[in-house]
Image: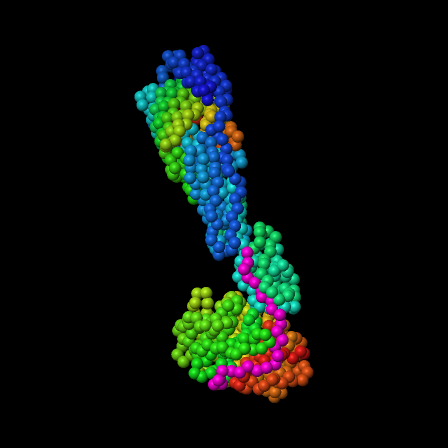
Amino acid sequence: MSQEEKVHYLPGARRVAGLLLFGLLAGCGGGGGGDDAAPVQISTNAIAFSATSPSAAAPAAQTFTATFGKDVVQLSVVHSGDAIASTSSVQSGRSATITITPSTPSSIGPGLFQGAVAVTGYTCADTTCSRMAAGSSATVMVNYQISPIVSSVTPYVTTSGASDAVIIRGAGFRAFSSLNVRFGDTAATAVTINTAGTELSATYPALAAGSYTVHLEAANHAGEIPSNVALLVVDPVAFAATTLDHPASTTGVRRLVYDAERQALLSVTDTAPSNPIVRYQYANGAWGAPTQAANGFLDVALSSTGTQLFAINGSSVVPVDPVTLALGTAVAAPSLVTNSALKNIVVGYDNLALITTSLTTSGSTQGYLYDPVGGTVGLNGTSLNNATPVMAANGAGAMVVQGDPTLTSDVATYVYSSAGHAFSSTGTPTLRQNTVAPAVNRSFSRVVLNGTKVYDGNFSLLGTLPDTTTAVVLRPDGNRAYAYDSAAGGILVYDISVDRDEAAYTALGAVTPLAADPGTGLQMIITPDGGTLFVGGSLRIVVQPAPAL
Amino acid sequence: MNSQKLCLTASLLAALQLATNVAAAAEPAPRAVQTTNWSLGLVASDSDTKDSTSNGTFGIKGIATLPIGSLFGASVEGNYSRTTARTSDVLFDVASQNSSRQTCRFNNSDAAVSVFARKPTLGRIAASYGKGNVTSDCGDDSVFVSTGDDSMGIDYYRVAAEAYLWNFTLGAVHTSTEPEDGSKLESDIFKASWYPIENLKVTLSGGDLYDQDTYGIEIEHQPEFMGNSLGVALGYSVIDRDQEIGTINFNVVYHFGPKVELKRRDRFYR
């Protein structure tokens, strides 16, 4: 046995001392209490932020105070949730002022967002402070409302006394529950929202003439959703049959545009020495003398908000005042191919303009997109052969046909989607465009190509119109086609609401002769109320009430 | 707290009395530390604060003990541990597209030197000095109260006394901890250990920390089949306050050097 094993624990004094020590251990330790471990207390349990739109500035940061006990060695401020960008704290003694900075609305978009800020006082978990343990915590709940934004309604002008649908664009339409639409105080009768929550179709009931602010309502949105977008409802205008003279030396019409807000007709004409935009104002039951602005224009389109005309000449886009025809600053199209020129322009519901290009011969050239906000023109990445676009009145998409008489085979037709600024081939039909521009109705449920073939919105062939059709337009509801028939010498009306199984449509009633011969190279448009046709040709413009059939 | 300091003083006096009265009665005295030895261990703990966050700690700990003559000994120890708070306990699980829930971590490192006098038949009196540093990484702007930044130094002084009574060991420890730029923290712990068998120790402890009572129980075992070189300890402690903090500790330590039973290791080597 080793020395260290010879241990004898002696009774007596040692036992007494040991019992004393044990007794002390058992008896001590009752000194708890005091306020060293006072819990963390905060001045508020909830903070709310709100922004009027995703593009609004971030709301001001908000602060709260936290007080804590003497036992707190470290004060932790942590947060979670998209509502909060950052937190900061400034300590003073046993209190801290904590600032919550919300996320910028543009970084998280519209919607209801939550966040939480937890303030935890950590204490030493052992006598040497070698470990930290959480003391008490207090949590502030953060709610952040970023309202949806209403950016546009298309078409922005519509007709009184008739129900129809408009497309409302913006952001965050799916960020709130049970979204409804009001036009002024009148609720929409049907609302359909796209998956991305950026676009909805709302059907309004028959409205009286006036301006109606487009309101969104959501059950879980606090307060009214801001909107400065308005739907303008105008009474139908009963234009009498008449003619409008071109400027002298005019040899043809390239485009007719009807400005329903201002009851004005605009045309782009082939007029030497420099093609003008010509404006005819209708007021007090009569058409006024035309005004014009020339810049070698080839086409023009009214912006989706009606505040500008976008005109093109061979190489640039020119914004034009729709009333005074004052010319804005031209924006040149970049990288224009040699011997090519800008050809046509149409405007989508996002107010971006699609521009097609042409060559003097058959050949594909890239088109452009014009952004009036940035004042830029850029290539759109799609090459087409002398393409002709026609935009639906709701601005959602355009029918695009292409081709040249020298082609020996048909080529693809396309649909341009304003949502993605992309072209998609229709598959069928294929064709070589002729001189008759395509016609589409307001909601793109009916399409007429080359003046003869009538399709539904999915490009199923419904029936045909006579080969003698030299211009055609569709009533906004898509139920009627108004065709200028060169053989009949006037307007023929067809009921294209029915599917003729690819057979020929039969005209309703007799031909309606025009008040005068418009000449050749016809362009025809129809007013949004469907009541008036404007037929322009090399000789004049003819105003013709649409046949009531 | 005054009553607790009185208790501590009385306990230390009792331990000293114990040592003084019986010193002469011992047989040829074994040394304070039989031979130089050292140990290396892993420490883990899980701490849960009522109505607040819980956190977990993992770390490593090493200690070397050496004799200084026959009556004295010294030890050098070092610790490193990392504590991760579970902020999900207090941060609502809000839907997030762009951000993640912030966490809170602490890194602690410290080292201490102790000198002690021991009679393996009687008990031990020790004094220690330690120095450490703790850093935090908690969200955007979380700081130590005393320093105003994410790091805090710590100095601590400790005196301890133990009395060996048959299969029992009674002890008291007073620690004075001085956080950097902060208020001094005084704390006391009293311990009573029982060795029902030579390789098993059950320790009850009580004390105060921040004027709050603390209680603990720990069971340490040194299995023979591991050659008396591996010890495991499982403990539970409570800081008795409004928001009670309960901590479970689990330690595994490997002893290099002599392979002796736990009770013997505690009284002749540690």
Query: Can residue B136 be seen here?
Result: yes
Say which quarter of the image contains residue B117.
Answer: top left
Q: Residue at x 55, y 71 (%)?
A: A262
Taking the magenta stretch, the answer to whether it contains residue A241 is yes
Q: Is residue B154 above or below residue A293?
A: above
Residue extending farthest top: A12
Say which quarter of the image contains residue B176.
Answer: top left
Q: Is residue A530 above or below residue A45?
A: below
**What quarter of the picture does the C terminus of chain A occupy?**
bottom right
**Is B27 or A415 nearer to us in this picture?**
A415
Q: Residue at x 44, y 20 (%)?
A: B5
**Is B173 or B88 nearer to us in this picture?**
B88
Q: Position of residue A509 (x, y in %)?
A: 68, 83
Residue extending farthest left: B69
Residue extending farthest bottom: A487
Q: Is residue B91 above or below residue A57?
A: above
In the image, the segment drawn in magenta is A226-251
Q: Is residue A284 left or right of residue B105?
A: right
Q: Position of residue A155 (x, y in %)?
A: 57, 68
Query: Can residue A440 be seen here?
Result: no
Q: Position of residue A355 (x, y in %)?
A: 47, 73
